[in-house]
Image: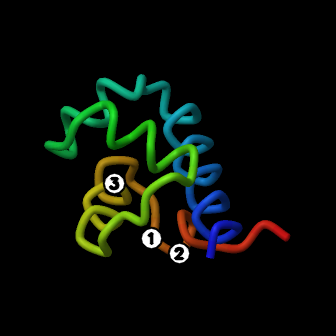
Amino acid sequence: MKDRLKNIGINVKSERLRKGLSQEELAEKCEISRNSISLIETGKINPTIIKMIDIAKVLNVDINVLIKNNK
């Protein structure tokens, strides 16, 4: 489970950086805290599917891009 969460975090961070957004900007657009984005990106929390959908929409990517396994 921890590996999956870390993978999701890496994917979210990669897409966020590709879009040129700070954690603060992404958080604001998703209506969650910057700390929550940080915790997602470091794999320390398990985001709800609703939050993942919101993040995917803001980043303008298919949710599968965020949840794919990089290994």
Q: Position of residue 65 (x, y in %)?
A: 57, 66
Residue 21 sits above or below residue 61 on the image: above
Residue nearer the viewer, 4 or 29: 4
Name the residue at 33% across, 54% down: 55
Crowd tier of the residue under label 3, counting other residues whose Cα lies within 10 Å: few below 14, some 14–19, many 20 or above: many
Which quarter of the figure is the N terminus placed in?
Answer: bottom right
Q: Residue furthest right?
A: 71
**Hey, what amino acid is under mark 1?**
Ile
Q: Which quadrant of the view contains residue 62?
A: bottom left
Q: Are marks 2 and 1 in contact (CB under 8 Å)?
A: yes
**Hey, what amino acid is under mark 3?**
Ile
Name the residue at 42% across, 65% down: 46
| Residue 49 in the figure: left or right of residue 32 | right
Name the residue at 53% across, 75% down: 64
Question: Mark 3 — residue?
Answer: 55
**Hey, what amino acid is under mark 2?**
Asn
Question: Mark 2 — residue?
Answer: 64
Question: Mark 1 — residue?
Answer: 63
